[in-house]
Image: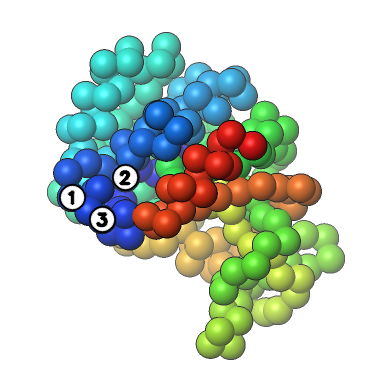
Amino acid sequence: MIFAAGLGTRLKPLTDTMPKALVPVGGQPLLWHVITKLKAAGYERIVVNVHHFAQQIVDYLKANQNFGLDIRISDETEQLLETGGGIKKALPLFDPTEPILIHNVDILSNLDLSALPADAPQLVVSERTTKRYLQFDGDMRLVGWKNIETGEVKGREGRSLAFSGIHIFHPSLAPLLGGWPDRFPIMDFYLKACGDHLIRGYEAKNLRLLDVGKLDSLDKAETFLKE
């Protein structure tokens, strides 16, 4: 599943006329980069959620014959559902027995998507400088979250690793979504579920990752892709 419904406010004024997913980097939209990476890794069915300038994304996929893949649209035009609500709404579009790789549309990385284990929920993390860190125990089980600027902690502290915006949602967790509202962040769900359910961190060694969320990151993205 590709999260492509966001408003892209940090990329204004580009996103005044197009969705973030279609902002070009290296001559191709962000969405192109993620889809082609998924296709190269062997993924055949992709769900894209849409909200901001949704029709532009639908038209783009149609113009490219869905890149030869089974691409389905999860329509959030009436209301943005955030990451957790987006997954909850899209579940009927997936095989209920299969794990789902979740990938933010504005993330570029050198991660080998075909190498991710899918036997349990997996949050792709790395040693990277950020303001908010996930917390893991010695077995790489998720135990909490920490904001190093404010000192706020959810759950308990452990080894601090930065979340990549890429994760695997396992079907074993699907029944738990029923008690959640239509709109919520998936990380709140994971942090609540990790007390009773196994949610692992997958530490990606030598991960190179760029969040193309701001205007000043577009030039960096051009260099990142060349390298």
Of residues 8 and 91, which is closer to you in this image? 8
Q: Position of residue 156 (x, y in %)?
A: 67, 79
SS label for mark 2: helix
Q: Are marks 1 and 2 in contact (CB under 8 Å)?
A: no
The disc label shown at residue 12, or none? 3
**Which residue is the site of mark 2?**
20
Q: Earlier in the sequence, mark 2 or mark 3?
A: 3
How crowded is the residue under tag 3: few (<14 C-alpha within 10 Å), some, or many (20+)? some
Residue located at (26% from left, 43% from top): 19
Asked if the residues shown at circle 1 and circle 3 are in contact, with their CB atoms under 8 angstroms apart, the answer is: yes
Residue 112: where, in percent of width, then height? 68, 34
Question: Mark 2 Cα within 10 Å, few/some/many (few <14, many 20+)?
Answer: many
Q: Amino acid type of disc 2?
A: Lys
Residue drawn 74% across the image and 52% down it? 203
In the rendered structure, are the residues bearing label 2 and label 3 in contact, judged by CB atoms less than 8 Å apart? Answer: no
Disc 3 marks a residue whose amino acid type is Lys
Please provide percent x and percent y for residue 123. Answer: 63, 52
Could one spot residue 51 in this view of the protein? Answer: no
Considering depth in this image, is 212 or 202 the residue closer to the camera? 212
Q: CA distance from mark 1 to mark 3?
A: 6 Å
Taking 31 as reference, is 106 above or below it?
Answer: below
Residue occupying image coordinates x 71% and y 70%: 160
Q: Nearer the viewer, mark 2 or mark 3?
A: 3
Residue 98 visible here: yes
Q: Nearer the viewer, residue 40 or 48?
A: 40
Q: Report the residue at 32% width, 12% height from top.
A: 65
**Residue 118 lies in quadrant:** top right
Disc 1, SS: helix
Which quarter shows the C terminus? top right
**Residue bearing the label numbered 1:** 16
